[in-house]
Image: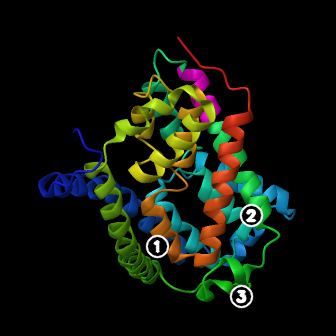
Amino acid sequence: MDHWFWFSLPDFAYSFLSVVLEGVPFILAGVVLSGLIDAFLPPRVLARLLPRHPAGGILLGGALGAILPMCECGIVVVIRRLLQKGLPLSSAMAYMLAAPVVNPIVAVSTYAAFRGQGPLEMMLCRIALSFAVAVVIASIVHFLRRAWVLRPDLVAAPVIDDHPDVRSGKEKSAAAVRAATGDFLDVTVFFVLGAAVATLFNTSVNQQVIMPLADDRALAVGSMMALAALLSLCSTSDAFVAATFTAFPSAAKLAFMSFGPVVDLKLVFIYGLVFRKSFIGFLVAALILLIFTLCTLLPIPNFRG
């Protein structure tokens, strides 16, 4: 492709279908978990499980992905349900930002993708970087007003009572199905819009235009972050794409794998299920600044072998 932009309807349709088929299973997993939380997790139980200190809740939220791994396509509906059940906003934010990367599935895929390029180092650095970013952003969110962060229907804290749930198992299962169906319809609209925009970039823009930027670390990091947001890859597979950019420093590849799972074209739309537009802009800006700064200034070597 000689030009930087070229549109082909068959390529667009094929790529769009691929993105949708890749994302839908994770959305289904997310809405099923969301439905189960709605029907079977009483707010009083969640309140008892959480640490009393906000810092403990943030650290627990960041580590929760190791127990409840969730792709970025499905995490937002789970977060919405947990917020409705009483999970503190800062804990929810830590889980949302960390879970797509800080989980065993992504750890294995990252190790496999970087064989010959320091697989263990890249895997550990990716997990550590994503966890640190989640904790820092969640700590900032802790000091923000809930009404400025969340959509109006999520602002009110749930009423936690000690009365037992007297519904039968059949009634709870029916409630779980209703909740999951509603969540699936909600998130699918945002997902399809984001997937269409991402597909337009993937099939129409010549990605080789960023290759001359590999020699400058700051430009390499910035360009790989932009590419990650535009490609909108799943966190379980993005490492295989990052590993192909052998001319780029390891720091730029880490930026690609840390930024894409928390900010991409699909997620910007899906975030609208939970957050106000003004906060989404703030969140994206904060993530850009934090990840770019860490990947540019930290002494990350170029891993080999």
Say which residue appears at 72% left-offset and 45% top-offset. 132
x, y (%) of residue 153? Answer: 59, 88
Q: Secondary structure at mark 3?
A: loop
Between the residue at mark 2 and the residue at mark 1, the CA separation in whole angstroms equals: 20 Å
Which residues fall within the magenta stretch?
119-126
Residue sitting at the far right? 53
Which amino acid, mark 3?
Val
Q: Mark 2 or mark 3, which is nearer the start of the sequence?
A: 2
x, y (%) of residue 88? Answer: 73, 70
Q: Is residue 103 visible?
A: no
Say which residue appears at 74% left-offset and 52% top-offset. 135
Q: Is residue 229 above or below residue 93?
A: above
Q: Is residue 258 above or below residue 122?
A: below
Residue sitting at the far left? 10
Say which residue appears at 79% left-offset and 62% top-offset. 140
Q: Is residue 169 visible?
A: yes
Q: Which residue is mark 1?
A: 35
Q: Mark 1 or mark 2, which is nearer the start of the sequence?
A: 1
